[in-house]
Amino acid sequence: MTNARWWLLLAVLAVACVAGLAIGPVPIGVVDVLRALTGSGDAQAVAIVRDLRLTRVCLAAITGAGLGMSGAALQGTLRNALAEPYLLGVSGGAAVGAVLAVVAGLTAAVALPVAAFSGAAAAVALVLVIARVASGRADPRVLLMAGVVVGAFANAAIMVLLAGAGEGTVRNALWWMMGSVAGAEWATIRWLALYAIAAGILLVAVARDIDLLALGEDAAAGLGVRVSNATRRVFLLSALLAAVTVAGAGLVGFVGLVVPALARAFGIRRARELLVASAVLGAALVVGADVVARTVRAPAELPLGAVTALIGVPFFLVRLRRAA
Amino acid sequence: MITIANAVVRYRGAPVNALDGASFEAQPGCITAVVGPNGSGKSTVVRALIGQVALAAGSARVGAFDVATADRRAMARTLAVVTQREEPTFPLAAREYVMLGRYPHHGAWSALGPADTAVAEAAAARAGAAELMDRRTDELSGGEWQRVRLARALAQGGEVLVLDEPGTFLDVAHEMAAFGLLEELAREGRTILLVSHQLNLVARFAAHIVLLHRGRVAAAGAPADVMRGDVLEPVYEWPLVVARDPAVGAPVLIPLKRR
């Protein structure tokens, strides 16, 4: 991986971020955006850029980075190019955890990701158990089916949990289930960033295990990996990353599928580089998708998850063809 | 040196033990071959050595390590394994793949350096994979892939090498080259344990043959002691004769058609 490629990746992210800050109902020029970021320049521009758009861009970037890394880690460990938190029902599980917490009145920024994480971890465990029972050695397609089933169950559980809630809450919750970074606030973002960075660093620390697990369990064991421990560690960290994104932005699908594949197409193969590149590309993709979400039918906003699904589903079909 | 002592392995839900009190040794300086019919426990021996199945009783030792308690990464610096099957889900450059053999020598944050590259290149050269290093793993033929895998195992740099069916996918020339290399590695003092179906080939290269039958050692010793009709026939449950290869003098097993 040459330095030039890393600079290119970072440039893509920078362009997406500047676009995220510049584009909106009130267009702001690039120079004014940069000036507003430093706090100088037109007061209205400063308010729009720093208070409204910067929070969105940050939350979108965290969401994309988390989903990208989570997907990259899950794909390597499960030896499955179609694995990603949304399709595996992990995000759905996280959503159940988060909704449960909200219903129980536990809405603190520090606690919501934790609640989402317990749901996500439970979903991972459930998916793996179902896949193993159904096919012994986890067949890639059976694994996805298990994920879809768990995801559907999670949706149903959320509906049941929300049955007694007021109309406003349901509307909010539905919007959130389709993914959105519209409600971004610094108080939340701080905690999400903290969790995401911690999980991201820990995941990079086990990147070599992911490389070896991608060879198969016996080969990994022969190269010194305690397979069950290492696998569990990667799953929990991937679940935590997915949970952070769900707690912050709701269900945003397919990012974890598309981003690692793009990074691989870019010539990145080793897990450590792949995780970092997926974080950067994921952030760029979701920031970009959010720009699309709020401009295509402005002043109305599309759900962020709808935009990523529109990108991701055709991509998934191509991948599925290749995997089968 | 590998020591398996009274090893018992039972897979969950299986009616019988996969290993049922097997004991044998593989000494440094020679090739030891584990042979036996399908389901005799050959691959279970390999899985037990890498800690992928736990022993219900007995012990497995590799050099100074007790497999049950050893630090796996430290053990991987002594023991390298070429498993029966392995297909990377995501293709790597062969060079990157061989470099994975250096991972056990590094912690999570220490970088692989020029010394590792040199070891990997040397390993590739020895395994006859030097010219394959710039290819992608998914573009290699079965035989090329097998050589690259052997290079990866050599790059681990250990004194003990375990190979499960190393001749699979290799044509005659590459098979003979591979076995010749194993012989050479053994002569340098390494412990080589190979698991194989190919009795005739094994009889020519191995100094010691362990014949497994239903998880137990049915016979063990020099090729001449194990490659005998009266020893092999009851284990393989098939009529056969053992002749002597006129060219190299090694025992040759000839299965007969059903009587």
Image (cartoon, coloured by chain):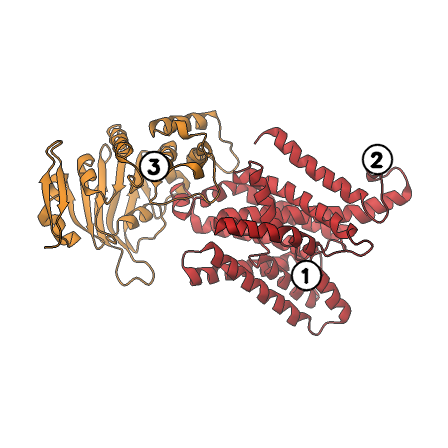
Q: Quadrant of the C terminus of chain B?
A: bottom left
Q: Among the chains, which one is orange?
A: B
Write down the colour of chain A: red
Residue depicted at 37% across the width and 32% down the height = B151
Answer few, some or many: residues within 10 Å of disc 2's Cα (few below 14, many 20 plus, some between 14 and 19).
Answer: few
User: Is residue A132 positioned above or below A79 on the image?
Assistant: below
Whether label 2 touches label 1, CB < 8 Å = no
**Residue A31's mark?**
2
Nearer the camera: disc 3 or disc 1? 3
**Mark 2 belongs to chain:** A
User: Do dots 2 and 1 share one subunit?
Assistant: yes
Give the residue number, with chain letter if any, for mark 3.
Answer: B143
Answer few, some or many: residues within 10 Å of disc 1's Cα (few below 14, many 20 plus, some between 14 and 19).
Answer: many
The x and y percentages for residue B126 are: 34, 27
Q: Quadrant of the N terminus of chain B?
A: top left
Q: For residue A160, which quarter of the picture?
A: bottom right
Q: For residue B130, which quarter of the picture?
A: top left
Give the residue number, with chain letter if any, for mark 1.
Answer: A177
Left or right: where A34 falls relative to B125: right
Whether label 2 touches label 3, CB < 8 Å = no
User: Is residue A34 positioned above or below B10 on the image?
Assistant: above
User: Is residue A301 positioned above or below A37 on the image?
Assistant: below
Residue depicted at 72% across the width and 45% down the height = A288
As helix, strand or loop, the secondary structure at mark 1 comes to: helix
**Mark 3 belongs to chain:** B
Left or right: where A15 falls relative to A282: right
